[in-house]
Amino acid sequence: MIENLLFELEMAAPQVILGLVNGAFYALLSLGLAIIFGMLNVINFAHGAQFMMGAFVAWMLLAWAGIPYWGALVLAPLLVGVFGMAVERTMIARLYKLDHLYGLLLTFGLALIIEGVFRNGFGSSGLPYAPPPEFGALDLDFDFLFLPGYRVWVVIASAAMCLLTWLVIEKTKIGAYLRAATERPELVQAFGINVPRMMTLTYGAGVALAAFAGVLAAPIYSVNPAMGANFIITVFAVVVIGGMGSIMGSVVTGFALGLIEGMTRVIYPEASATVVFVIMAIVLLTRPAGLFGRG
Amino acid sequence: MTINRRTLLGAAAALPALGGLPFRSARAQAANTIRIGVLNDQSGTYRDLSGPGSTQAVQLAVQESGIAAKGVTVEVVQADHQNRPDVGSTVVRQWIDRDGIDVVVDVPTSSVALATNTLVREKNKVFLNSGAATSDLTGAQCSPNTVHWTYDTWMLAQSTGGAMVRAGGKSWFFITADYAFGHALERDTGNFVKAQGGEVLGAVRTPFPGTTDFSSYLQQAQRSRAQVIGLANAGGDTINSIKQAAEFRITRGGRVKLAGLLVFITDVNSLGLEVAQGLVLSETFYWDLNDKTRAFTQRLGAMPGNIKPSMVQAGCYSSVLHYLKAVGDMGVAAAKASGADAVARMKAMPTSDDAFGEGTVRADGRKVHPCYLFEVKAPGESRGAWDYYKLLGTTGADQAFRPVADGGCALVRS
């Protein structure tokens, strides 16, 4: 009996951990989406493309400038974030007064253009990006499981970044301004706070989070122009399940759905691509505002 | 990437050549015009190994066929099937019914290829398949209108699978892309392994497209205690599988071997030699194989994305060249009137070109030529960009493909 249980545990443990790694990406990406939606009311469909840009910028920094992983982890989000701010200033800012749908269409179009440009420049099959060797020390080696140190790092880095973002928004003065500006932009502006600039910075921060996830993903997945498109649909489901715009919701749901998907890969692999959407349908039917949303 | 006025103008100038449909004015001279439609993946995981590079190869074939000197015009158009059978079928139907396309070329992704196969036969046009893998195209679903040119799952199973079994890999576990191609590759390889006295311990079917994380499947494969993990997938799936197998040190200690059953040179380029070194794979064309393949690559010129031609793109060149020879031989009117007749003429003539050498097209529609077993070089062995393979062995044209009698093709039952 106990042996049986141990065997089951041995089967399940690696999948739980691998699920957490995927959950880490879902959490980071859906966090960025939640921030952008929460503050700007824009459904940022270009999020997957910005995630992909993060990975590509990491590759470019290494291949063209010799800047290794650690440098890329800081620089790539900054560069892509600045790109995001330019996009917000020149295009998205014009749509705030219109229906959500326009922002969605604009960012969706942007995503297609960005992916197309990268496809023309770098092809579709992807570029190599080796995991930094220093993570070898973190390798976890049990006899039932070998877990590369890099994956452990991904979970830690992602969780830390989520926590940091939450702290900034909930516990700092800037965060308080942001939350206030979301509720009553005119009033906050009347207090002398530059709301449009804050919107720009918020969009930049959301995009930088996507790029940060992209750099984290580069050593694990093939760095190719479609890498974001593969993720983004699932991530949208995560955001919907968590409750649109809910920061806590997106993080918790991200990790949880990574776990559920991981378990599905063992129990019935054919369904692993659909399980998230089945959950989304159930949640929408029972709690239309999402698990953590304010209905 | 910067976009300036020059690149914009260049793109605008290239548009008519790149896509869209034949201009209406061309209709007038339809009688002596052959229309070729290149249908493949222009935007997804198989773009680099087929995509616009295939069209470029077809255009070279048209140029070198010398058919223009006989007063025949050839128009080449291309379209994206997005790896979806419904999209592919719609394009093929429009091409044939509305635009007068005579030949459909390439069509990677077996599910789309099988749909195209049925449609082209129904309309009595010609289907020159280079990109798809399923051996069903010349087996249960063989058609008098189809030639399967470059490779197939049976060939891969025998060449790569055979090499693994000979090296002692008797027990197998498959990671299979969950669609027609993956199933065919798993089936053909599994049959081959069993025929050689090996066993198949299990398989896991991964959703296609849309799977990026294979670590969970790799661990399941490892737990099965199989000696060989067979990757019955392609393109981005194979790249991610191999990359993550290296990351998880699946093959450490040498107890488990990874068999990439369908690995293209573009995949090797994407993986980098550091990760891909030592991988054993099978192809029917390699740009650096001999003087003729190097000359062909040279003539093809710079490819989109600065890649070297894949065997799929070489197959598009070679198949169209042979088709146009048949057209020149039988006359445009007869070739346009019946696709089946044109294919019959192709079968009656021996093939010869720089990419694949000498060969023949069999009664079941299978083009036969030698198959090469390669090993990916270590970074230290590679002398330069795209110097990736060393030749391990060659299977002759008569041995490389499934014997006609075993395929169950209705065309050859007498």
Image: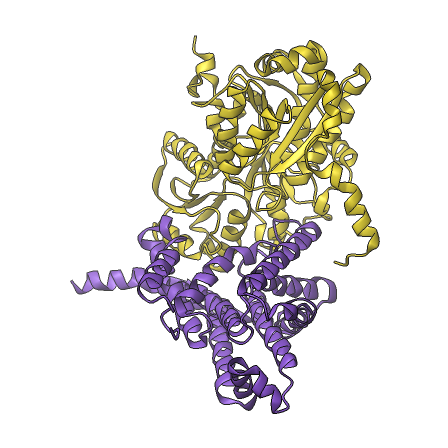
Point out residue A212 in the picture as x, y percentages from the top left corner. 58, 70
Q: Dividing the image into 4 quarters, which one contains the C terminus of chain A?
A: bottom left
Rendered location of residue B214, percent (x, y): 45, 54
Camera-side residue of B211 and B267: B211
Question: Viewer-proximal residue, A12 or A275?
Answer: A275
Q: Is residue A200 above or below residue A44?
A: below
Residue displayed at 62% across by 69% down: A69
Residue depicted at x 53% and y 14%: B363
Q: Position of residue B364 (x, y in %)?
A: 51, 17
Looking at the rendering, in which quadrant would you find the N terminus of chain A? bottom left
Chain letter, colour yellow: B
Residue A188 occupies which quadrant of the picture? Answer: bottom right
Who's the residue at 70% across and 11% down the image?
B331
Q: Which chain corresponds to the colour purple?
A: A
Question: Does B248 sit above or below residue A35?
Answer: above
Question: Which of B352/B149 is in front?
Answer: B149
Q: Is residue B405 left or right of residue A84?
A: left
Q: Which image quarter: residue B376?
A: top right
Tell me which colouring the rendered structure shows: by chain
Asked if residue A143 can be seen in this view, the reply is no
How many tags in the picture?
0
The vertical placement of B118 against A126, above or below, is: above
Toward the top, the furthest residue is: B414
Q: Is residue B284 left or right of residue A7?
A: right
Q: Residue A96 falls in which quadrant of the image?
A: bottom right
The residue drawn where x is 54% and y is 35% is B88
Q: Is residue B103 left or right of residue A138?
A: right
| Residue A62 seen from this side | yes
Q: Is residue A19 above or below residue B223?
A: below
Q: Position of residue B147 (x, y in %)?
A: 57, 22
